[in-house]
């Protein structure tokens, strides 16, 4: 199918680098080779990319949109005929309970991948990041939001299209306060994502004058959360934030059964999902949540094409598109970096990722792989603005421009866009 064309980014609030960068080591080895002269590289580049996205585990609901995004991007790259072809090898990250990554990552390394797109879970990514670094392989996550990656000693090989939870925590904490709540309880997954995000929500909510009354944690693999629920309810908070993955499917019914109002519940990117098949109608009506996103209206063309592509491949319809744009952009950026370097090694790709995102500040704007590739092949510098936003990587591999969407659940237990936070 034809390449997706991104028309505009209206209504998107941008966040400067200072809001996202905590501190960190330099990301990106020194620049290596360049693409060949106009007309294409000196020889066809063969790029092998793996994925470690959640096909199983507590984030499996994110798997279909993320995988679909990588598949459509790879298809467009191969159809473009710009001197580079992608062999995309899908793999399952699993979660910290089933640990599918323990067999999948060695398998992908054995396939000769130059980059791995994934994982979705920050905690899972931290389980194999060192394994990829040791092999000189780029790790590129479309969904990791833990602030820990900003300062991770990654030899310039870790990149992400999702912003740090410094941003989501600020938006969620302020949202809860703006809704008039003065006390907040949280139930938190005990990993780098959960405890990190809870810390930023606490900081934001308390800065707005609120008080966090309780924030008990649980571990991946736990199946009973009654103790945590009881601890939070005992403090009688005005609002409860669930900083979990799909553990919310068990936690929510217990909270509702205890009489806690749905409109005082708040979700995050790890559990903001379509629950229409899980709960009786109206269960979550009025509940709110956040995740890194743009206004859905600005990417309607993309989501329509992605649905057509995915179902055209014989797959079930996508029920939402969470992190699909970020996954699509990850694949496009990896291919553009390889083309700019004239080299498909992990180190060469890493050396060009900031440049092709516009992070060096001297590129020509473009919004499709084909258009960006033409700029590179003509000897120029491409600045890719993606479906998920301008991206614009800083020196540690974090996007410097990003937005957080605010959503609200309807009577069907499906979330609807409200505004950019």
Image: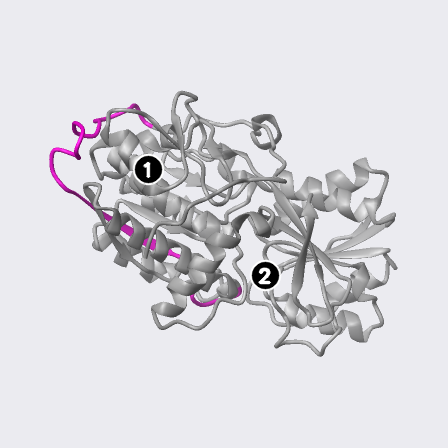
Mark 1 packing: few (<14 Cα in 10 Å), some, or many (20+)?
A: some
Magenta span has 262? no
Q: Who comes first in sequence, dot 1 or dot 2?
A: 2
The residue pinned by badge 1 equals 371
Relative to 373, does residue 79 appear above or below in the rendering?
Answer: below
Which mark, residue 245?
2
Which mark, residue 109?
none
The x and y percentages for residue 271 are: 61, 60
Q: Quadrant of residue 196?
A: top right
Q: Residue furthest top?
A: 362
Q: Disc 2 on helix, strand or loop?
A: loop
Q: Main secondary structure of the magenta part?
A: loop
Q: Which residues are magenta?
A: 29-58
Measured in 3D between alpha carbons, the distance from the residue under mark 1 to the one under mark 2, in whole angstroms, is 38 Å
Relative to 148, does residue 56 appear above or below in the rendering?
Answer: below
The x and y percentages for residue 223 are: 61, 72
Q: Disc 1 on helix, strand or loop?
A: helix
């Amino acid at each position: 199918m034809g390449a997706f064309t991104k028309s505009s980014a209206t209504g998107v609030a941008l966040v400067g680098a200072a809001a996202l960068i905590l501190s960190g080591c330099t990301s990106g080895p020194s620049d290596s080779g360049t693409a060949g002269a106009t007309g294409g590289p000196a020889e066809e580049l063969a790029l092998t990319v793996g994925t470690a996205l959640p096909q199983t585990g507590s984030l499996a609901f994110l798997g279909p949109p993320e995988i679909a995004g990588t598949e459509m991007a790879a298809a467009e790259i191969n159809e473009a005929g710009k001197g580079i072809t992608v062999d995309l090898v899908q793999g399952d990250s699993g979660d910290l309970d089933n640990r599918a990554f323990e067999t999948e990552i060695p398998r992908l390394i054995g396939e000769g991948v130059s980059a791995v797109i994934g994982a979705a879970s920050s905690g899972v990514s931290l389980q194999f990041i060192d394994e990829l670094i040791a092999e000189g392989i780029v790790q590129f996550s479309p969904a990791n939001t833990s602030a820990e990656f900003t300062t991770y000693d990654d030899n310039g090989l870790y990149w992400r299209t999702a912003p740090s939870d410094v941003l989501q925590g600020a938006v969620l904490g302020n949202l809860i306060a703006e809704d008039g709540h003065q006390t907040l309880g949280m139930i938190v997954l005990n990993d780098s994502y959960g405890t990190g995000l809870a810390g930023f929500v606490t900081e934001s909510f308390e800065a707005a004058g609120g008080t966090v009354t309780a924030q008990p944690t649980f571990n991946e693999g736990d199946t009973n959360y009654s103790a945590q629920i009881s601890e939070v309810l005992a403090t009688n908070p005005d609002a409860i934030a669930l900083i979990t993955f799909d553990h919310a499917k068990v936690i929510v019914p217990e909270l509702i059964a205890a009489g806690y109002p749905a409109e005082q519940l708040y979700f995050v990117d790890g559990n903001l999902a379509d629950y229409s098949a899980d709960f009786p109608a109206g269960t979550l009506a009025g509940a709110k949540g956040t995740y890194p996103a743009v206004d859905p209206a600005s990417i309607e063309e993309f989501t329509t094409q992605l649905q057509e592509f995915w179902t055209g491949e014989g797959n079930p319809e996508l029920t939402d598109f969470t992190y699909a744009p970020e996954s699509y952009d990850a694949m496009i950026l990896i291919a553009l970096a390889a083309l700019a370097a004239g080299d498909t090694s992990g180190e060469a790709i890493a050396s060009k990722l900031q440049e092709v995102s516009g992070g060096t500040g001297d590129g020509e704007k473009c919004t499709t792989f084909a258009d960006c590739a033409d700029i590179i092949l003509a000897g120029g510098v491409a600045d890719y603005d993606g479906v998920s936003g301008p991206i614009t990587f800083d020196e540690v591999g974090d996007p410097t421009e990003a937005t957080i969407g605010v959503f609200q659940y309807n009577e069907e237990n499906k979330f609807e866009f409200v505004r950019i936070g």
